[in-house]
Amino acid sequence: MSKATELGLPIADWSEVLRETWQNNVARQGWSTRYAAAIRRGVERWFMFAGAGVLPTPGLVAAYEQALRETVSERSALTYLQHLSYGVQLLAPGESWGWLMRYVLDRLPRAVPPSRAPAASRKRLGLPVAEWPTQWRASWVQITRRASPFRFLEGQDNPIADWSPAYRKRVERGVGLLAGFIATHDRPPSLAVDLVHDFLDDCAHRSVSGQSMGMFAEEIHRAFTLIDPERDLSWLRKLADELKSARPVRNKSARLLRSQEIQEGGQSLMRRARRRPLTTETALQFRDGLIVAVWAVRPYRLSDFASLTLNDTLLVGKGWATIIADRTKNGDGHVTPWPKALFAGLEEYLRVYRAYLIDTAPDHGRVWIGRDGGPLTTGGLSRHVGDVTERLFGRRINPHLMRDCCVTSILEADPRESLRASALEHFPIILDHNLQQRSS
C-alpha cells in the first residue's frame, strides 16, 4: 500500500453511491489513468480528514489547509486543494463549487506580468465629426452651433433644438459610418443613390441586420435634410422605412453546424499548417485551427476564452490541461478539462507556433497570440473566428453561435440531456462522451 493511499480513505471504503457516481463521471472526462488517479487521491485524502461522504464547506476547507501545511510542503498542500476542487465537482455536480475554486485560485502563485505594451488602436468603422468630408463637417458645425446654448434665438432658425444629446449622437453615428465607408473605399463625398446602396451592401456583408441598416439610413436622411435642405431625399426616406419595417430574418438554424464538424474543420487547418514550412502565415493558420476546434467543444464566453493565460486560467501538465473560469454569467466559476483529442495540438502550438509568433516580443502569458506577438483582443478574436469559419464552412459562426451549435449537437445525440445542456459546466462531459461514441 502506497504512502498516498495510507494517508487517504481508499475508494473501496466509500459508500456505494459515491463510488458509482465517481466512476461514472470520471469515465466521461477522458482523463489519463494517471491524472484521474491523482484527482482521486486528493478526494481520498479529504475524506480521511473530514469523514467519508462529507463534502467541503468553507470552515472545513480552511482547517484542512492548515492540517496539510503542517504535514506536507506548501506546494503539495496547494496541489491537494486543487485536486480536491476538481474531484468534488464529479462527486456532487449539482452543487455550486465556485467558492472552492476561487479559494484555491487565490492561493496559487501567479507570475507578475511585465508592464503591458499599449494595445494597437482598433480600426474605426465610423468617423467623428472632425474627420467628415470638409463640406459635410462645415455645414454640420454651423447647424449644431445654432442649437446651443439657447433653445430659441430671435431671427434664427434652430432646427435641432428639440433633439436630445443621445439622438444627436445617433444621427452623427449614421453619417460617421457613411464617412468611414467613403474614406475606406475612396469614394467621392456626394450623397448619391449608388453610394448609399454600396454602403448598405457593405453593412450586409458584415452581417449587420436589416433593422440596423434601416436605422443608419434614417440617421443619414435626418442629417442631410439639414446639411443639404434643397436636395430631394424622398428615396432615402423610403429606403429607410422599407429596411426598418422588413420582417427580421434570423434563420439561425441555417447557420448551425454540429460540433464534430466544426472541430474537424479546425483540425483540418492544423494539418494543412503542419505540411508547410514554418512561417508567420502557417503559425497563424495552426492557431486558427486550434481555436476553432477547441471552441467547438468548449464554448466559453468570449472574454474568458480570449483571456486564457498560461499558469493562470490554463494549467498545462504532462498529458493534461485544465481550463479554469473564475467568473461566469451566474457568478460561479468552474473547471473543465482541455479536450483530450486536442491536447497534442495544444502542446505543439505552445512549443512551436506560439513561440514563433512571440519571437522577441514580451510574453505576457496569454495563450492566443496575434501576428505581432501581442495578445489577441476580444473584439479581434470574435471577428477573426467569424472570418475563419466563413472560409471553412461557407457560413459565419460567431463565438456566441458556437454555444448554439453545442446545444444542438447535444440534443441531436440525446434529447434527454436537454436539462443539462443549458449549463456550460456540463458541456465537456456530454460533448466529449458523444463525440467519442460517434468516432468509435
Image: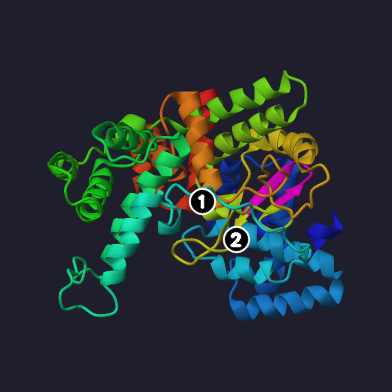
Q: Main secondary structure of the magenta part?
A: strand
Q: Is residue 296 visible?
A: no
Which of the numbered marks, if any, corresponds to residue 302? 1
Q: Quadrant of residue 369?
A: top right
Q: Is residue 417 left or right of residue 271?
A: left
- Closest to the observer, 16 or 188: 188
Mark 1 and mark 2 in contact (Cβ < 8 Å)? no
The numbered mark, 2 or 1, whose residue comes first in the sequence reads: 2
How many marks on residues?
2
Q: Position of residue 141 (x, y in %)?
A: 34, 63
Magenta stretch in the rendered image:
315-323
Q: Is residue 267 left or right of residue 248?
A: right
Kindly state the secondary structure of the residue where label 1 is placed: helix
Residue at the top extreme of this rendering:
275
Residue at the front extreme of this rendering:
155
The answer to whether residue 63 is above or below residue 175 is below
Kindly state the secondary structure of the residue where label 2 is placed: helix
Mark 2 burial class by Cα count in 10 Å: few <14, some 14-19, many 20+: many
* The C terminus - image quarter: top right
* The N terminus - image quarter: bottom right
Q: Position of residue 15 (x, y in %)?
A: 58, 59
Q: Position of residue 144 (x, y in %)?
A: 30, 66
The three-letter code of the residue at mark 1 reads Leu
Tell me the residue that label 2 is attached to. Answer: 88
Q: Quadrant of residue 292?
A: top right
Rounded to the nearest angstrom, the CA distance separating label 2 from label 1 is 27 Å
Q: Quadrant of residue 198?
A: top left
